[in-house]
Amino acid sequence: MTDEPRTPEPDETAPTEPQRPKEDVPPPSSPGVRRLTRSSSDKLIGGVAGGLGRYFGVDPILFRIAFVVLTFAGGVGVLAYIGLLAFVPADDDSRPFGARRDANMIGAVLLGIVVLLILGPPFFFVGPALIPIAILIGIGILLWRASGGTGIRGGDPGRLIARAVIALLIGIAAVGAFAGVFVLAALGGGTTLAVLAIVAGVALVVAGLSGGARWLIAPALVLVLPLAIVAAADIRVDGGVGERQYRPVSVDDLRPDYELGMGQLVLDMRDVDLPAGTTKVHLQLGIGHTVVRVPEDACVSSDVQLGAGHAQVLDRSSDGLDVDFEQASATTTDRPRLEIDSDLGIGALEVVRGDDPLPSNRDGWWDDNVLDGPACP
Amino acid sequence: MKPGADRVSIVAGLAVGGLGVVLLLDQTGLVELRFGYALPAVLACVGAILLAAGLDGPRR
């Protein structure tokens, strides 16, 4: 892929030392002072990244990637871009929004508000899920560059469409491979995949020393990224897929372990008359939703480990990545104690008392203002 | 560096291989990987490759 002959650029065919293209020459300014300007030639939208790249002497693609990634961090990327677009002059003196600077300022503020409204809650509630998407976009750009892509400007429409179709197909294949590796790792093939990642790394180094094999970078990343997610969330889906509901009627029916790979796991202990002392229950779910209803009179202590998602145990809730908390109940009471030990990969855990409504079923998703009461009734 | 060597491939190989070692250690139970460590590691891996590619430019 990388060895395909490329159409020589004008400066490559010149017999003498190639000159810098005219458009890359910074505009005249005071001697010794470098001005930051937007590029009128190297641009995809407003020439901000092109100007920054020229100013700092690095490839503008780095700034483009940074803007895209920061866009998923609360819209910072878009806001920064709009700000720079509004206030940094172009090297050809064109205005991005209009002829007046105050109009630029108002336009930038309005656009910033719109972006915040769009990317703020509830529209940005899938924030963590966007990180892999941003990484995939990065991989796509890498692949594009590795295959000799030079951007969308200046090309003929037919070739651009063909490249877009190829990029789309590659993207679909990457997502499919990503999902496949994810499932394989979650099914217990993590060790083999990790060894393959090491082999791919060694192969890349060896290939790099003898000329390079950039086409191998994207497959190697597609191999290693889902494995990292599975490992970080400690996801195991070998416990089955679907919906499992358990409603034991006595303590004899209660099992010490409840396990599900992917889906919804419901453990309803409302009918169980817990004996005095401590009763322990262990829950394990790879991906999905776990609901536990505890008896009305039980004192509940919990040890929750959740890779990513939301956990609510009675009056205690936490969400995000690496959710890990313990909740202890009083040991001096003569009420029966229930110890819930839960290991979840990605998803949600809800522990409620008796017939209390689930937090996720109340008005608004995960209304943290409505609490279920303390560990002991 | 050896003439004809591709810096981007080497950087990518070291980054991917390093990440693979960490993941293997996690699989064998020697370390316990969490998102708090895994995400920065992954982003550093991708960032190192992008930086190398950006500094090196497209292959001729």
Image (tube, rainbow, N blue to C red):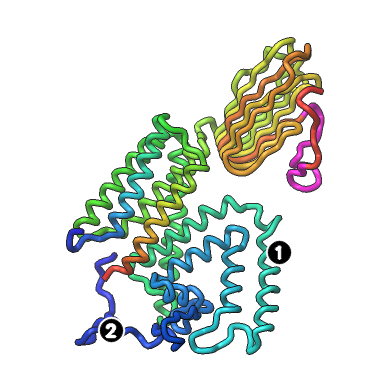
Which residue position holds label 1?
A: A117
Q: In the rendered view, does B5 fall on the left or right side of A353? A: left
Relative to A220, does residue A236 appear above or below in the rendering?
above
Q: Which residues are magenta?
A: A353-368
Q: How many marks?
A: 2
Quadrant where the image shows the C terminus of chain A:
top right
Q: In the rendered view, does A369 fall on the left or right side of A11? A: right
- CA separation in Å, label 1 and label 2: 46 Å
Which residue occupies the foreground of this view, A347 or A55? A55
Under mark 2, the amino acid is Asp
Q: Give x and y (percent) for residue A280.
A: 64, 18
Residue drawn where x is 61% and y is 68% of the image: A79
Q: Give x and y (percent) for residue A206.
A: 22, 51
What label sits on residue A11 in the rendered view?
A: 2
Under mark 1, the amino acid is Leu
Asked if residue A10 is among those painted magenta in the image, a careful observer would answer no
